[in-house]
Image (tube, helix red, strand yellow):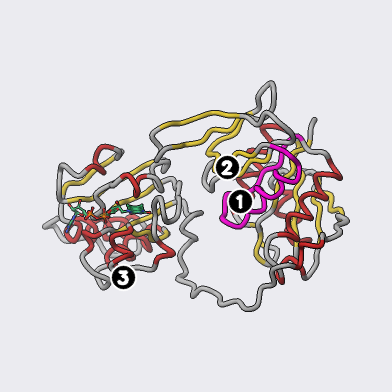
Amino acid sequence: MAEVLVYVDHVDGAVRKPTLELLALARRIGEPVALALGDKAADTAASLAEHGATRILTHEAAEYADYLVVPKVDALQAAVAAISPAAVLVPSSAEAKEVAARLALRLSSGIITDAIDLEAGDEGPVATQSVFAAAFTTKSRVSRGIPVITVKPNSAAVEAAPAAGTVQALEVSFSAQATGTKVTSRTPRESTGRPELTEAAVVVAGGRGVGGAENFAVIEALADSLGAAVGASRAAVDAGWYPHTNQVGQTGNSVSPQLYIACGISGAIQHRAGMQTSKTIVAVNKDPQAPIFDLVDYGVVGDLFDVVPQLTEHVNIRKGSMAAPDSRR
Ligand code: FAD
């Protein structure tokens, strides 16, 4: 069976969920071989093997952390040369997409970005994409070279599929360009304790209807009851109510969670572009004509300050973490 190369996203050896999703997709089209780079790359082995990697290629070098993307492209190219895979799968993060694009250029291969599904085809893997603000769903395949495909988080369920997971050191020689752009400092983002927005299974988002920065506490409370990430519309971000890093939409993050709850968001096309592939969409809006209702699975017409705290309370009750509500509700 043909091998499929999966580029691993990990933090200090802990494999991130989108990579485990890639392994599930890779198994549909061949035998997954994982490539893990940088500090503690070998620590990824147990998790990758548990999720179907038959081989794990590793290379640890300071260059991966000290310089921007080119060392990673060099390593991926070396891995492609070593195993001649049927396809290369890469998570759809901003950095990994740049790595994928550069690799495709070097291989003279076609690239498909932001796939939301992948299946085996007679002439190579067929990728599904959601395009033009999710107005169309397309299926395509790469017609030249080794297909390089980036896949959005939450596009497949993580599946345990124990495999050999043999660890092999990859030989990589860095190109002259590898050390061209050095990382001079790093400032870690303050942790909120919530999941990463682009990877979260549940996202609760607030818009202009939230009415102020302090009112986002209502959105955060619902998010915390559901173990969700918090998103925001551009109107809320531009007003300075929530950080730009949490913006969802055409000029913000693209999310595809199992559940997206839009609170006080009208559903402008630019917002939809970033969330329309969510599996289940719920909206709370006091205007029954709001365009967001055209796209929801469940809609609540009402004031979010009335609806959202009740929802939070009932979620917490279901989780058994609060006393029963009084009989007025
Ligand atoms: P509004 O459109 O003002 O909607 C607020 C909604 O809240 C209304 O429907 C109202 O009925 C409801 N509401 C008010 N009070 C309450 C209440 N108490 N309870 C319940 N409901 C209430 N937007 C993005 O979000 N992401 C992007 O990435 C993005 N990129 C853009 C790129 C370009 C080039 C352009 C031109 C625009 C972009 N926009 C983006 C902006 C977009 O067009 C909209 O202006 C924006 O999405 C509106 O945000 P909103 O829905 O929060 O606000």
Q: Which residue is mark 1?
A: 97
- Extreme-top residue of the structure: 122
Q: Quadrant of residue 222?
A: bottom left
The reply, left or right, for residue 207 in relation to residue 161 is left
Amino acid beneath label 3: Gly
Per the model, the C-alpha gap separating discs 2 and 3 is 31 Å
Q: Secondary structure at mark 3?
A: loop
Amino acid beneath label 2: Thr
Q: Quadrant of residue 119?
A: top right
Figure check: 254 above or below 214: above
Q: Quadrant of residue 110?
A: top right
The reply, left or right, for residue 231 in relation to residue 106 is left
Total of numbered circles in the picture?
3
Q: Position of residue 226 (x, y in %)?
A: 38, 57
Q: Which residue is mark 3?
A: 240
Per the model, the C-alpha gap separating discs 1 and 2 is 7 Å
Per the model, the C-alpha gap separating discs 1 and 3 is 29 Å
- Please give the range of residues in magenta: 86-109
Q: Secondary structure at mark 1?
A: helix
Q: Position of residue 54 (x, y in %)?
A: 79, 43
The answer to the question of whether label 1 and label 2 lie on touching residues, with beta carbons closer than 8 A, is yes
Amino acid beneath label 1: Lys
Q: Which residue is mark 2?
A: 113
- Extreme-left residue of the structure: 328
Q: Position of residue 272 (x, y in %)?
A: 35, 45
Q: Secondary structure at mark 2?
A: strand
Residue shown at the point (42%, 56%) measured from the top left: 252
Q: Nearer the viewer, residue 58 or 110?
A: 110
Q: Nearer the viewer, residue 204 or 268?
A: 268
Does residue 47 belong to the magenta stretch? no
Dot 1 or dot 2: first in sequence order is 1
